[in-house]
Image: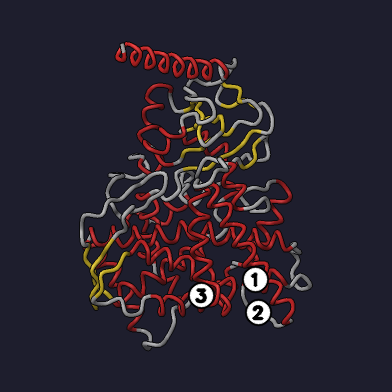
């Protein structure tokens, strides 16, 4: 009897599940939409998307083509894997498209962050950001701070086993914090770092505000970070001292053509930290990994940096001319970003019903411009799964239309050159000071974030 009841319960649950799936499919079966599946109510296909990542995308493309519908990260979404269509979408933001980042990211990064705004507001906020990281500012103010920080951060690594993932995460955040808050960054760095790591995890989660969820922890971390930054701004106003750092520049409204409120300043700072942190830390970690696995590339890179050191005294910092001479270093950074695929794609949202690729996309839907596969296109990159920095020595490759590793259109990463300067300076001091070998056994994940769940451990010795 018990077995019979159990079978009935199982059949009932299966019927309910089947009915829910069927209902959700019928709900989104609007005329003119591209083919695809929508998964479960509310959750959609988010679990499959996050767990399977690129394989989920490949399977859906095999079934429905390079333009299909889905329901991921809490939103009905059109996925575009067509390179030409992706380029069109990125270059035509004003024509019925605005940024469409997940609600969790918008809530945690703030409503004034540059990824959330559009139109004239985006232009204004982007202008304010670019004023902080212009080539002149990088050369005169930021690069000396980066150099000083990297020298200190990479001290005394010899004869130690270190987790390079942890070290590059600390490096990316603390280096940015020093550029933003100068000398005061030291006093807030540890509590800030603990909260910031929670914030990052919360940005790529379902916006379910329940105890124990990454979303709740990330949102609470944002509140704590806002409190720290508000206190710092208030203390600076009370002291009336002048500070030559990013926060000082943002606060000097009388000298700055971009006059921001405190809320906008704080969201701008969080945006700078967030956008630089992920790309700089992960690219640095993966460069160390790829260089370890490809001794010829490491030899070429080390030769470039030793030549720079030979022209300098030990205490001389890296300057802008040194950065310009790091041609192979730049190639290593581009190839690492391509092969590791730090950024998988970008999201847009429709502001009206619009036609794309022969289909009608309803107002309010997300469009996921999935750029990952472009990085492995054999027509663009021969032997695409091979780590080959030499391919980037041809500068024309940086200018080709389908290069989207730093974004595209009006949303191309404004901090691209600053990020390259940080990674280049890190690699300079790392490879001229040290040799390293992997301990082994550490697993790497490539989706939804590039990370080593248990860390990436290396044994470091003096060069």
Where does the image place residue 75, in percent across and percent down from the top left?
Answer: 56, 33
Where does the image place residue 214, in percent across and percent down from the top left?
Answer: 50, 48
* Label of residue 247 in the image: 1
Helix, strand, or loop for circle 2?
Answer: loop
Report the front residue among 158 and 186: 186
* Label of residue 243 in the image: 2
* Label of residue 35 in the image: none
Q: Nearest to the eye among marks 2 and 3: give it.
A: 2
Report the front residue among 81 and 58: 58
Question: Is 426 rendered above or below residue 13?
Answer: below
Helix, strand, or loop for circle 1?
Answer: helix
Q: Quadrant of the N terminus?
A: top left
Where does the image place residue 444, in percent across and percent down from the top left?
Answer: 30, 50
Q: Is residue 268 found left or right of 322 in the rendered image?
A: right
Q: Are marks 1 and 3 in contact (CB under 8 Å)?
A: no
Where does the image place residue 195, in percent across and percent down from the top left?
Answer: 52, 61
What whole-number distance in Å separates the C-alpha atoms at marks 1 and 2? 8 Å
Label 3, residues with CA under 10 Å away: few <14, some 14-19, many ≥20: many
Label 1, residues with CA under 10 Å away: few <14, some 14-19, many ≥20: many
What whole-number distance in Å separates the C-alpha atoms at marks 1 and 3? 16 Å
* Label of residue 143 in the image: 3
Question: Is 331 rendered above or below residue 402?
Answer: below
Q: How is the image coloured?
A: secondary structure
């Amino acid at each position: 009897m018990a077995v019979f009841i159990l079978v009935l319960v199982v059949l009932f649950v299966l019927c309910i599940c089947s009915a829910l799936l069927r209902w959700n499919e019928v709900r989104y079966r609007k005329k003119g939409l591209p083919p695809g599946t929508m998964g479960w109510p509310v959750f959609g296909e988010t679990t499959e998307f996050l767990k399977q990542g690129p394989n989920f995308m490949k399977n859906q493309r095999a079934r429905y083509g390079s333009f299909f519908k889905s329901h991921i990260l809490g939103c009905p979404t059109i996925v575009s894997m067509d390179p030409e269509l992706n380029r069109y979408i990125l270059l035509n933001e004003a024509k019925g498209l605005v940024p469409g980042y997940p609600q969790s990211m918008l809530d945690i990064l703030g409503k004034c962050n540059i990824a959330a705004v559009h139109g004239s507001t985006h232009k204004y906020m982007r202008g304010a950001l670019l004023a902080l990281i212009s080539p002149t500012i990088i050369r005169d103010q930021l690069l000396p701070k980066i150099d000083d920080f990297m020298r200190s951060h990479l001290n005394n690594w010899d004869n130690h086993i270190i987790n390079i993932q942890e070290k590059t995460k600390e490096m990316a955040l603390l280096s940015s914090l020093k550029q933003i808050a100068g000398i005061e960054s030291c006093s807030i760095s540890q509590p800030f770092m603990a909260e910031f790591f929670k914030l990052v995890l919360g940005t790529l989660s379902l916006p379910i505000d329940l105890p124990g969820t990454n979303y709740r922890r990330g949102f609470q971390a944002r509140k704590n970070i806002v409190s720290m930054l508000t206190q710092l701004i208030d203390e600076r106003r009370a002291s009336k001292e002048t500070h030559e750092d990013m926060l000082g520049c943002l606060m000097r409204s009388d000298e700055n053509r971009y006059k921001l409120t405190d809320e906008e300043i704080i969201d701008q700072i969080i945006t700078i930290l967030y956008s630089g942190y992920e790309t700089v830390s992960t690219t640095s970690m993966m460069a160390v990994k790829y260089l370890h696995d490809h001794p010829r590339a490491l030899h070429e890179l080390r030769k470039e940096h030793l030549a720079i050191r030979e022209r300098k005294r030990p205490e001389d910092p890296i300057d802008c001319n040194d950065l310009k001479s790091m041609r192979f270093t730049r190639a290593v950074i581009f190839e690492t970003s391509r092969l590791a695929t730090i950024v998988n794609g970008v999201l847009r949202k429709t502001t009206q019903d619009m036609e794309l690729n022969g289909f009608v996309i309803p107002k309010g839907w997300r469009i996921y411009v999935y750029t990952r596969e472009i990085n492995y296109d054999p027509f663009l990159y021969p032997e695409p799964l091979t780590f080959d920095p030499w391919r980037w020595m041809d500068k024309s490759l940086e200018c080709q239309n389908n290069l989207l590793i730093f974004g595209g259109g009006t949303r191309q990463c404004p901090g691209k050159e600053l990020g390259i300067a940080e990674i280049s300076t890190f690699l300079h001091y790392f490879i001229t000071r040290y040799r390293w070998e992997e301990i082994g056994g550490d697993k790497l994940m490539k989706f939804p974030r590039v990370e080593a769940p248990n860390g990436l451990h290396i044994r470091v010795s003096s060069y």
